[in-house]
Image (spheres, grey):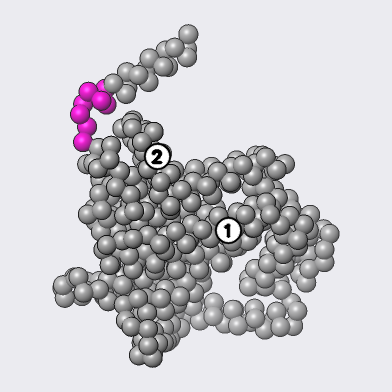
Amino acid sequence: MINCQLKLYKDDILNIFKEQNINYDKVYYYLILVFAFLLPLSRAAVSLFILLLPVVWLIEGNIQEKFLHIWKNNLLKSILLFLLFMISSLLWSSDISNGLHFLRLYSYWFAIFVIATSIKKEYIQSFITSFLFGMFLSELIAYGVFFEIWTFKAATPVNPSPFMFWIDYSVFMAVTSILLLSRLFSKNYKLKEKMFMLVFFLSTTVNLFLGMGRTGQVALIAGIIVMVFLYLKPNIKSFFIGIFLIIGIYGAGYTISETFQNRVNAGITDIQSMQNNKFDTSWGIRVVYWMITYDILKDNPMIGVGVGDYKDSINNYLQKNKYPISKETEEFIREHHAHNQFLMIAIQTGFIGLILMLNILYQILRIKIDDEDVKYFSILFITVYFVSCMAEPLWAKQFTIALYVLFIGLFSSYSINIKSKI
């Protein structure tokens, strides 16, 4: 009886939407525009729009044809195959509960298919600009905290990250910095626009160095190197321009930010400690995760230990093998993630999962985008994002996985034109 009533309610709701002759182009436009703006500002908004976008997509209908176009698209198909393999790894996981926890975040990826198949290409620059305005607002709040004009949540003058964990925020700022820098190199913006972007770039980059997030700071170096060779010819001149930018930006950061100085000095100390076979440091722990992953892959090379068993496996190998760490560091490793997205995928799904992950990266690079600025930014985004993945498991965190979903959805929309086919 209850099932029949629910079916009737569902049918009534669908009929209401169909009878209203909704302009879904506008619905998607405003939903994604607001999503991009709120992405750096609200955890609750991220959850809402990640849920709302697929609901609207399903209500719109034509599901079979949409999935047909998804399957014909190399990038979207590579994402789908990766997700299916991650889900199937539950079959060889003993900790199903932990596996479902990981898959809950991977469910965010469904919004990539929605964005890719639902927007017009001419809207993409508007969505990117909306994201920039969201970051601009977050930075105003961060600077207010830094200069002690106001207090905001857990942000402090020492670490003024207003809405998310400081490592995640450093990734957002690195993406924003490289996006603004690429627009400054572009020929498609007027001088007045570039003046505003220059000020915004400087404020974002300074903010990046005020925080404690070395992940974004390191990733930005890779982004700058790639950007110089994209916009300029790959020659000696380009090389020196890249070196000049890196030395100028990071030299200024080291001069003005005591926090950045301390983080750089801590990194040097970490390297010196590892040279003395002491790995009880931030960088040392990351190296130990490489050692553990190597041992796990020797025993589970092809399919890993399953999406749910990565922590149990790490604990087992800590018991079986002797690593150059103290008991306190060993306890830290037991309680935390692998601090590297590539290592987590390798542990969970072996070389097959890692190959499927790298195939996604390859397919992103192969996207044919006729807008040069968007094409270059797609390359810069994955450079910054996947370099950051070397230090943090960005697919295991809400804000950074939503960042990935938004931009990969936008980039992949260039390689699919479903609106003209259904």
Residue at x 56% of width, y 66% of height? 390
Query: Residue drawn at (31%, 72%), measured in percent from left and top?
Result: 182
**Pointer 2: residues within 10 angstroms few (<14), some, or many (20+)?**
few
Magenta span of residues = 16-23
Residue at figure coordinates x 76%, y 69% from the top left: 325
Query: Position of 265 compared to 246: left or right?
Result: right
| SS assignment at label 2 | helix
Q: Position of residue 54 (x, y in %)?
A: 39, 38
Helix, strand or loop at mark 1: helix
How far is disc 1 from disc 2 in space, using C-alphas? 24 Å
Residue 316 picture location, percent across and down: 79, 54
- Kind of residue sitting beneath label 2: Leu
Measured as percent of width and height from the top left, residue 100 is found at 60, 40
**Residue at 25% from the left image edge and 59% from the top image edge:** 125
Residue 20 covered by magenta stretch: yes
| First in sequence: mark 1 vs mark 2 | 2
**Horizontally, is 57 left or right of 297 in the view?**
left
Q: Quadrant of the C terminus?
A: top left
Q: Which residue is mark 2?
A: 68
Residue 310, position as x, y percentages in the image: 68, 52
**How crowded is the residue under tag 1: few (<14 C-alpha within 10 Å), some, or many (20+)?**
some
Q: Looking at the image, is 152 positioned above or below residue 252?
A: above
Determine which residue is flagged by label 1.
355
